[in-house]
Amino acid sequence: MTVEQLISFARGAPSLDIVDIEGLKAAAGRAFDADPAGVTGYGTSVGYPPLRTWIADKHGVDVDQVLVTNGSLQADAFLFQHLVRPGDPVVVERPTYDRTLLNLQRSGGELHPVTIQPDGVDTDELGKLLESGVRPKLAHIIPNFQNPAGVTLSLEKRQALLDLAAEYDFTIFEDDPYADVRFRGEPLPSMLSLDRRGSVVHASSFTKTVCPGVRVGYLVGPAPLIADIAREATNLYISPGMVAQAIVHQFCLNGDLERSIATVSSALGDRAAALATALRTHIPEARFTEPNGGYFLWVELPQNVHVDRLAPAAAERGVTVVKGSDFLVEGGQHALRLAYSGVTVDQIDEGVRRLADAIQAVRR
């Protein structure tokens, strides 16, 4: 393998070899055969009705609690636009998804980062923040295989968050696109399923289980909230993409989704294990929590390694990474997010070797 062959730990997307191309082609044919008028028409702002029903059944909710969107990032944007006004306090995880930070900052939200621990957000720290008088409009939480930290919120902390939301009257935004991509351990119940007070709005996506190109995500929440957002969506785009949503629906109906999840989870489990082994071998001073699923691993490096210098040095050696500072309001200058979803096992060791060489070159 030569340096000219780029190895990318930057993008959280599956490599082509684990995308079910044939299954998607067949699902597309079935979608047009089964419902040509529904596939080719405008549709409604709540999304393709049969897929909306399938999602409602998956989560055990009424269909009027579901809105299907063009990817989960658009679902996020709809919710932020509806709930967050300039100056509203918003709790975010530290670190958290970079585009979440961007969208919340654009909305004018006053961000309050709360530390991530190996078992998820520090609910004691959040409790102290609330006791200090901060009254957030919502708390954005990625509970499973968090992006970028890779950690999973414990059952105890899920319940603690629900209790805090009830006591202090804020919405928990459960942003959960990775839940099905588990390769180790047992799944935990969603906060949506544990919620008895209407405190949770849940978002997910088929990007990680089908493929990124379908751009199909969704929101699940209280019916009045979903109806309000649906009216806003109508004014924005009349309807999301019916073709993609109908293909995803057929993919789900035929058992293809379960097979795709099994393929993706198995491959990513191998890749995550290979990445952890390579880091321990080539960068033994790196600190990280090995994930049980998802796409990402968060690496803390020594204080004499600054990622503003490391990222370009790594790129010169043919390996790309994302700086930890991209995922924080402040800090992260000695951290990286490594995505193992788009690299094969045989690329991982070489990529980490190159990263280790770049670290040695930029140490102070």
Image: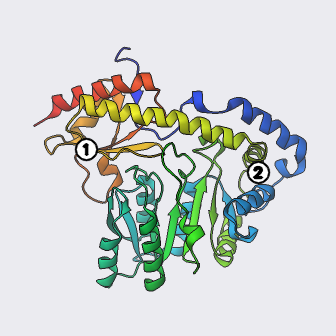
Mark 2 or mark 1, whichever is nearer to me: 1
The colour scheme of the drawn protein is: rainbow
Residue 103 locus on image (x, y percent) = 46, 61
Vertical placement of residue 358 versus 337, above or below: above
Quadrant containing the N terminus is: top left
Q: Is residue 238 visible?
A: no
Vertical placement of residue 258 versus 73, above or below: above
Describe residue 279's horizontal placement relative to residue 269 as left or right: left
Describe residue 245's horizontal placement relative to residue 342 as left or right: right
Alpha-carbon span between mark 2 and mark 1: 44 Å
Q: Nearer the viewer, residue 249 or 277?
A: 277
Name the residue rendered at 34%, 77% in the picture: 127
Q: Nearer the viewer, residue 37 or 187?
A: 187
How many marks the image carries: the answer is 2
Quadrant containing the C terminus is: top left
In primary-sequence order, the first of circles 2 and 1 is: 2
Residue that badge 2 annotates: 242
Any mark on residue 120, and which?
none
The amino acid at mark 2 is: Met
Q: Nearer the viewer, residue 126 or 38?
A: 126
- The secondary element bearing badge 1 is classed as loop
Residue 37 locus on image (x, y percent) = 89, 50
Describe residue 171's horizontal placement relative to residue 302 as left or right: right
Name the residue rendered at 15%, 45% in the picture: 303
Q: Is residue 191 visible?
A: yes
Residue that badge 1 annotates: 287
Give residue 220's quadrant in the image: bottom right
Give residue 66's quadrant in the image: bottom right
Name the residue rendered at 66%, 71% in the picture: 226
- The secondary element bearing badge 2 is classed as helix
Vertical placement of residue 313 versus 101, above or below: above
